[in-house]
Image (spheres, rainbow, N blue to C red):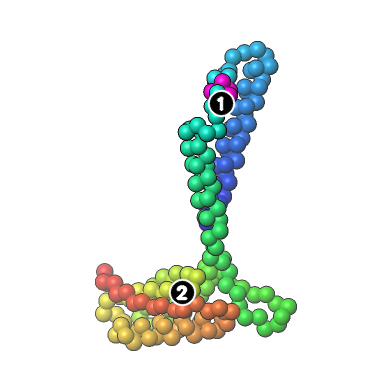
Amino acid sequence: MRIANRLLAFLLSLALTLGAVLVLIEIVAYAVGAKAIVLDWPGLYRWASGTTWGSGIVRLVGVGLAVIGLLLLAAQLNPRRPDRLRLQAVDSATDAAITRRGLARTLRDAAIEVDGVHDAHVTVGRHLVRVRAEVHDGAAPSVDSLHAAVASAAQHRLDALRLAMAPALSVRIRQEEQQ
């Protein structure tokens, strides 16, 4: 959500800057006695002075702006997943945490250390960590024993980290054909 917020903020600031530049151009043009350059603001002014608040177009624009505002509000009220996962503190004066990326790398390393595992992909969610270990076809022991070994290694590493709220662990084994 952080990237979306930055993109929306950039677009909004760009639109406001362009609007301000257009208004300045029109003010300078009016001050020197020239006609409207970019916007036909005299025609817009005449239309706005003859339009009531109860007209259909004004209501439609108002409803559209309200819907956009509610969508933006709902997007901001949706809680982001935390970037860091807190660790149990040994001392009350200590605040320690691990990033999601750091946890994923640690669990990937634990999975790769298991004999027969060629590669591993780890996804850290809010309440669940998914480990997908890849093995070459025929080069590893049985899938069941490999599943148990990877799950045990990853769970041992997770327990060693002592997370304040440890996520559940899901392990899958994927066999690849050896080339």
> What kind of element bears circle 2?
strand
Residue in the foreground of this view, choosing between 121 and 169: 169
Give the class, few, some or many, for how many residues have Cα within 10 Å of label 1's Cα (few <14, many ≥20).
few
Q: Is 4 rendered above or below residue 119?
A: above
Q: Amino acid at mark 1?
A: Ala
Residue in the foreground of this view, choosing between 161 and 128: 128
Q: Specify the quadrant of the image occupied by residue 38.
A: top right
- Residue at point 26% right, 80% down? 138
Q: Which sits earlier in the primary sequence, circle 2 or circle 1?
A: 1
Q: Amino acid at mark 2?
A: Leu
Residue furthest front in the image? 54
Q: Position of residue 101 (x, y in %)?
A: 52, 68
Q: Position of residue 22 (x, y in %)?
A: 60, 27
Q: Specify the quadrant of the image occupied by residue 50.
A: top right
Residue 48 is tagged as 1
Which residue is the site of mark 2? Answer: 128
On screen, residue 12 versus residue 145, left or right, reads: right
Residue 66 is tagged as none
Q: Position of residue 116 (x, y in %)?
A: 35, 81
- The range drawn in magenta is 44-49
Give the class, few, some or many, for how many residues have Cα within 10 Å of label 2's Cα (few <14, many ≥20).
few
- Residue at point 53% right, 69% down? 100
Q: Position of residue 117 (x, y in %)?
A: 37, 78
- Of badges 2 and 1, nearer the viewer stands 1
> What kind of element bears circle 1?
helix
Q: Quadrant of the C terminus?
A: bottom left
Q: Specify the quadrant of the image occupied by residue 2.
A: bottom right
Instruction: Determine if the magenta segment contains residue 83.
Output: no
Q: Is 64 rendered above or below residue 79?
A: above
Residue in the foreground of this view, choosing between 58 and 89: 58
